[in-house]
């Protein structure tokens, strides 16, 4: 695997890829786990050359969030990417990505970016979309892969790529879970042993909500969402939202609609966890 710290280096490698060859990119913030590696392997099914990126993007963190303590495990990440057969790793410094303060931004529409996670992390999706557009411009892939665990992020990226007419296919990879159901996340490493034992409840609560919606198309959605929040609260969580939404745009939808997803975010101690399940 070739490692590129500069945009010029990555672009030279990209230019050396044959015109007939397809290129996939998998953007990450590092601290890779099996979920990321499954995206790398999927990328290989769609492309001749796979580029991974590692960049912890300050723009998508709010003051007081975990930008400083976000786990940086570069050597271990490289070993995993090598083993997964990734061809190129683009791992720029902040100075390389933002040589001067970024003054142009991607501003996703409020109805997509200020709901759910965006309500609790104002500005997050603006920072995320801005860096993703930069990464797509730098790597110029045919295909880009993102995990469905960040469902709202995936929706916003799909819409951005469509509205800016980028000739890039966006693929969402299924969430990879631990045996007890907990969705894999770099932030799981923040959990204490007791919190780690409690953490699968988020998945269990969502699974029960999905089962209830599938069972009865007359379900009282507000009641189901509230029951889920209450169960989390009873077990020491601080839930931010549990919501049944349309997959396509994450807007509210009647329970009898097809194409629904339930999403949740909740804090366990000082760790914020998110998860979702398609109905
Ligand atoms: O999902 C992530 O790891 C990040 O939000 C992304 C897409 C790499 C942008 O920084």
Image (spheres, rainbow, N blue to C red):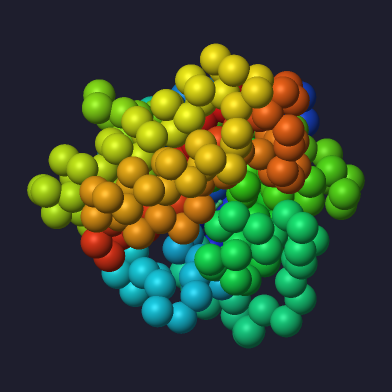
Q: Quadrant of the N terminus?
A: top left
Q: Is residue 240 above or below residue 105?
A: above
Percent x, y of residue 241: 50, 53
In the rendered structure, the answer to whether residue 59 lies left or right of residue 20 reads left
Residue 98: which quarter of the image?
A: bottom right
Residue 131: which quarter of the image?
A: bottom right
Q: Is residue 93 above or below residue 55?
A: below
Percent x, y of residue 198: 20, 43
Q: Residue at x 60, y 36 (%)?
A: 221
Q: Residue at x 27, y 65 (%)?
A: 270
In the rendered structure, the answer to whether residue 189 lies left or right of residue 126 reads left
Tell which of 98 and 116 is nearer to you: 116
* Labels in figure, total: 0
Residue 196: which quarter of the image?
A: top left
Q: Is residue 196 visible?
A: yes
Q: Is residue 260 above or below residue 7?
A: above
Q: Is residue 71 visible?
A: no
Percent x, y of residue 6: 54, 63
Tell which of 134 and 12 is nearer to you: 134
Q: Residue at x 79, y 61 (%)?
A: 109
Q: Residue at x 77, y 58 (%)?
A: 111
In the rendered structure, the answer to whether residue 10 lies left or right of residue 112 reads left
Tell which of 45 and 2 is nearer to you: 45
């Amino acid at each position: 695997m070739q490692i590129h710290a500069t945009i010029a280096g990555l672009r030279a490698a990209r230019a050396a890829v044959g015109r007939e060859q397809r290129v996939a990119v998998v953007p990450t913030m590092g601290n890779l786990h099996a979920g990321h590696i499954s995206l790398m392997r999927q990328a290989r099914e769609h492309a001749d050359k796979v580029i991974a990126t590692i960049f912890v993007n300050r723009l998508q963190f709010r003051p007081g969030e975990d930008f400083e303590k976000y786990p940086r495990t570069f050597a271990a990440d490289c070993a995993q990417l090598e083993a997964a057969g990734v061809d190129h790793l683009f791992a720029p410094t902040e100075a390389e990505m933002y040589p001067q303060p970024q003054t142009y931004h991607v501003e996703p529409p409020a109805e997509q970016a200020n709901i759910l996670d965006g309500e609790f992390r104002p500005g997050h999706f603006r920072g995320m979309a801005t860096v993703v557009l930069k990464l797509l411009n730098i790597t110029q892939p045919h295909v880009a892969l993102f995990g469905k665990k960040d469902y709202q992020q995936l929706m916003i990226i799909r819409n951005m790529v469509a509205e800016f007419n980028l000739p890039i296919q966006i693929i969402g990879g299924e969430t990879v879970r631990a045996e007890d159901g907990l969705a894999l996340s770099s932030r799981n490493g923040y959990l204490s042993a007791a919190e780690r034992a409690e953490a699968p409840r988020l998945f269990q609560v969502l699974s029960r909500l999905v089962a209830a919606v599938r069972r009865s198309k007359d379900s009282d959605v507000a009641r189901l969402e509230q029951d889920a929040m209450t169960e989390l609260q009873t077990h020491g969580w601080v839930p931010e939202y549990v919501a049944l939404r349309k997959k396509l745009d994450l807007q509210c939808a009647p329970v009898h609609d097809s194409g629904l997803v339930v999403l949740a975010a909740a804090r366990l101690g000082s760790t914020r966890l998110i998860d979702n399940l398609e109905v």
